[in-house]
Image (tube, rainbow, N blue to C red):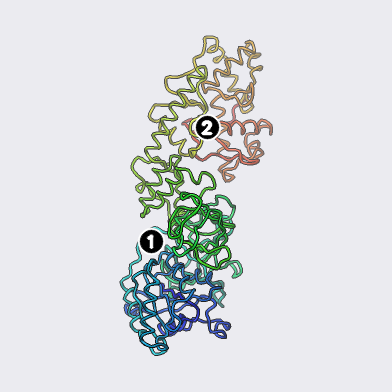
Amino acid sequence: MIVGTAGHIDHGKTTLVRALTGVDTDRLPEEKKRGISIELGYAFLDAPEAAGGAGERIGFIDVPGHERLVHTMLAGATGIDFALLLVAADDGVMPQTREHLAVLSLLGLSQGAVVVTKTDRVDAARLADVCAQARALCEGSSLAGCPVLAVSAVSGQGVADLKDLLQRTAASRHRGGDEGRAFRLAVDRVFTLDGVGTVATGTVHAGRVSVGDELRLVPGEAGGKPVRVRSLRAQNREVAASGAGERCAIGLAGIAKDEVRRRQWLVAPAAVLPARDTPRAGSTRMDVRLTLWHEEAKPLRSGAIVHVHVGSQDLLGTVAMLDSGDSLAPGASALAQLVLHEPLGTWAGDRVVLRDASATRTVAGGVVLDPLAPSRYRRTPERLAELAALESPEVGQRLAALLHAAPLGLDLRRHAASQGLAELPADTALPPGTLREGDWALDATHAEAARATLLKVLAAYHERQPEELGPDAARLRRLALPRLAEPLYRAALAGLVQAGRVTVRGAFVHLPEHGVRLSASEERMAQKVAPRLAEAGFEGAWARDLARDTGESEPLMRTALARLAQRGELHQVVKDLYYPQATMATLASIARRVGAEHDGVVMAATFRDATQLGRKRAIQVLEHFDRIGLTRRVGDVHRVRADSTLFSTPGAGERERPCK
């Protein structure tokens, strides 16, 4: 269990921790000289069950009380399990007492106690008055009704009772809801040790880590900078593994001290957020459920500049209200988007605290719903429905509700990373009937609607273009479901083909009852050109050459070849240049092989060398593959679509190069 102190400067936080643990958490010379805490301090206390090294161990985080160091206090307060709000009996409730209580409440802390310190300096009447002030102060906060204890660290009065309260709470405490979470630690201190190297410390927010594990440092370079766990200390003990709710010091291999800083996170690779608006790992927009502190004098308005605190991070950002007009009244709650000035590491469920632009007071707090929020369509009914789904209390409920609210499908990898999950949801975790293809999933109702749309658009296409066999698969997607994720579109189309409701011939899609019929003369010409097309090999055959070789007129030959292309029996790579299906399947197989050898990339030069074609013809064939959906043009290269099923039928594999 992690216990955090809070309260006004010089109200006895460090002295109380020393009385409970015997450890002086003021370690810096400047702290000793001035008698105040400047940096976070740490100490530990064994509960009775921990004798012999087993059971619960209590960790203490001693935070600064000075108003200029509230950002440091926030770095320590995020991640604590039990709060001790200190009020000195001789001073009573002071400004930082109120702000620290606001921080604790906005962080959602419901377990804690108020400790009235320095009781040896006042009489009984004054002590009773301060205790009453403390109880009244907590009303309306998350610590309302918490115990109020009178303590003197000098005389020892009440110290044993406080220690007993903490040990009983630690012994009975159960940390639930962490199953399946990826490891995350908010870095709040970095230093070097002889024989160990770089060490980062912080509170483990979720998951478990073991010696030898690979972690990522975020925010930072794309994908997070990789580091390896060399050693571990949890709750001030050497351990082989550490988990959620513990103070942890991680010895890191593969990184220097000046490459790690407070405000960063050490996370399992699965929890690295995919970039949306930035090439760096991290989030620049997050949607949150925001609550304005009830003691604020004015509403919080859209466009307000604020300091955003998450974990040990503090960044500037802008507030955009989503469902409450342009402002949020004191004590009210609403959906909002925080637009950050630089990437920040955060995950769904994290608590966020906002301070005003000048960082002089705490104004609001809330919980992160989506750390990868969109910049467009953020106030649409569909988006608000997704956010309502993300507010469901359980992981499984959130997934089901989000699928139901996502007619364009759900990226499961992005969802798992934003939720801080260690792995993708299994098929058994998805609602019955869910359409899944790779990392994408579509609710059964939306999947059926997508299939119905495909059939409707295809029927309308046949009615408008009765002389054509049908659109190619890529064009059909643009006509029917342009915003649906391509893997889901391919899966929906494959389901219709398997059910016999749609036919795919070559690159073209059509209803089974629809087909392009050839005239007698066209049938005759098709038979005459077939051997010549096969002999043409990878160079293809021109319409004028086929007309000359068969003794047919060029206009009639062009018409017959176009009809054969509409039927899916030929491929027209450029105007008047045709390839038969078998030859094109062989070229496609070569493109796939070249892509497999070069991380999915097919360069014109490598494809040219593999096919022994000229550069111009190789480029023409690759551009045809782009059009029909076998490859995708990205800059100057072509990437093989992993989800494309074109030319994957039996017998369409690579064969020997056809002879001319």
Q: Is residue 651 above or below residue 217?
A: above
Per the image, the residue denoted by label 1 is 178
Q: Could you say which is closer to the camera, residue 523 or residue 583?
A: 523
Q: In which quarter of the image is the C terminus?
A: top right
Residue 639 location (% of width, % of height): 58, 40
* Residue 25 seen anywhere in this rendered image of the structure: yes
Locate residue 119: give its quadrant: bottom left
Q: In this view, does 329 lie above or below 190?
A: above
Q: Earlier in the sequence, mark 1 or mark 2?
A: 1
Q: What residue type is labelled 2?
A: Arg
The local secondary structure at tag 1 comes to loop
Per the image, the residue denoted by label 2 is 478
Q: What residue type is labelled 1?
A: Asp
Residue 537 location (% of width, % of height): 61, 26
Q: Could you say which is closer to the camera, residue 183 or residue 377?
A: 377
* Count of number-bearing discs: 2
Q: Which residue is drawn at 44% across and 70% down?
A: 101
Rendered image: mark on residue 344: none
Q: Could you say which is closer to the camera, residue 73 or residue 637?
A: 73
> Is the residue marked by circle 1 packed among few (<14), some (14-19), or many (20+) residues within 10 Å?
some
Q: In which quarter of the image is the N terminus?
A: bottom left
Residue 59 location (% of width, % of height): 42, 75
Q: Could you say which is closer to the camera, residue 154 or residue 571?
A: 154
Label pair 1/2, CB-CB below 8 angstroms: no
Q: In this view, does 585 lie above or below 222?
A: above
Q: Residue at x 69, y 31 (%)?
A: 616
Residue 387 location (% of width, % of height): 43, 49
The local secondary structure at tag 2 comes to helix
Locate residue 235: give its quadrant: bottom left
